[in-house]
Amino acid sequence: MTQNREAHEVGGESKDKGRLPKDERRAQLLQAALEAFTQSGYHAASMDEIAERGGVSKPVLYQHFPSKLDLYLAVLDTHIDSLVFAIQKSIASNKANSDRVANTVQAYFDFIDTEGEAFRLLFESDMNVEPQVRERLNRMTYDCAAAVSAVISIDTGLAKESSMLLAIGIIGNAQITARHWLDRDSKLTKKEAIAFVSNLIWRGISGFPRQN
């Protein structure tokens, strides 16, 4: 029994958590890091704290992520991919363009409603000036806008730069209004807020003539 306990401690895994497959352990550590970064901030959060939250020793945490910055970037990448996929999915549907606009706005509101901590990390962290973080956030904005821009370009015949500018406007509008709704604890329901913002955007974008 002593040998088993010692082997367990050498492995660095918490006795309560047990051994998990690598992907599950990574997901668990990313969630622990997200909680630590959003509650304490990047600079105040320590790898010791994150390891404790994740139920592993610090050496095991470093086996998965060589540095705190690597861990932070991995957390960002996970949630950036989630948001970009949601936007691309909302645009890829065969529904009317007014529905695509509503779905795009809803994707942002759904994201902050279900992943509020991740949303704050993406858009409100003091780490957003870090070059590697800024590069990822710029890529996220571009990828989301590119999905919207492609539809605008096809439907209106506008040049690529013009379509992208309009798409950035749509994405920015959805993002900022969703943040406002979250921060203000609005009396508007999520459904009502989505409808207001979607109508505003649609009234603007629908003014561009459709390409025959």
Image (tube, grey):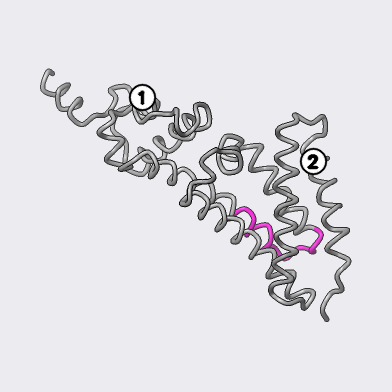
**Which residue is at the front of the view, 89 or 131?**
131
| Residue that label 1 marks | 52
Q: Is residue 128 above or below residue 144?
A: above
Residue located at (79% from left, 31% from top): 186
User: Which is more N-terminal, label 1 or label 2?
Assistant: 1
Query: In the picture provided, is 144 more to the left or to the right than 41?
Result: right
Front label number (2 vs 1):
1
Instruction: Give the residue type at disc 2.
Output: Lys
Near mark 1 (Cα within 10 A), the count class, few <14, some 14-19 or many ≥20, is some
Question: Quadrant where the C terminus lies?
Answer: bottom right
Residue located at (73% from left, 49% from top): 174
- Residue found farthest to the left: 3
Query: In the picture provided, is 142 more to the left or to the right than 195?
Result: left
Query: In the picture provided, is 31 more to the left or to the right than 190?
Result: left
Residue located at (35% from left, 31% from top): 47
Near mark 2 (Cα within 10 A), the count class, few <14, some 14-19 or many ≥20, is few
Q: Which mark is residue 191?
A: 2
Question: Quadrant where the N terminus lies?
Answer: top left
Instruction: Give the residue type at disc 1.
Output: Glu
Q: Does the segment drawn in magenta span residue 129?
A: no
Task: Provide residue 166's location: percent of width, then percent of height.
Answer: 75, 64
Q: Which mark is residue 80?
A: none
**Which residue is at the front of the view, 44 or 141?**
44
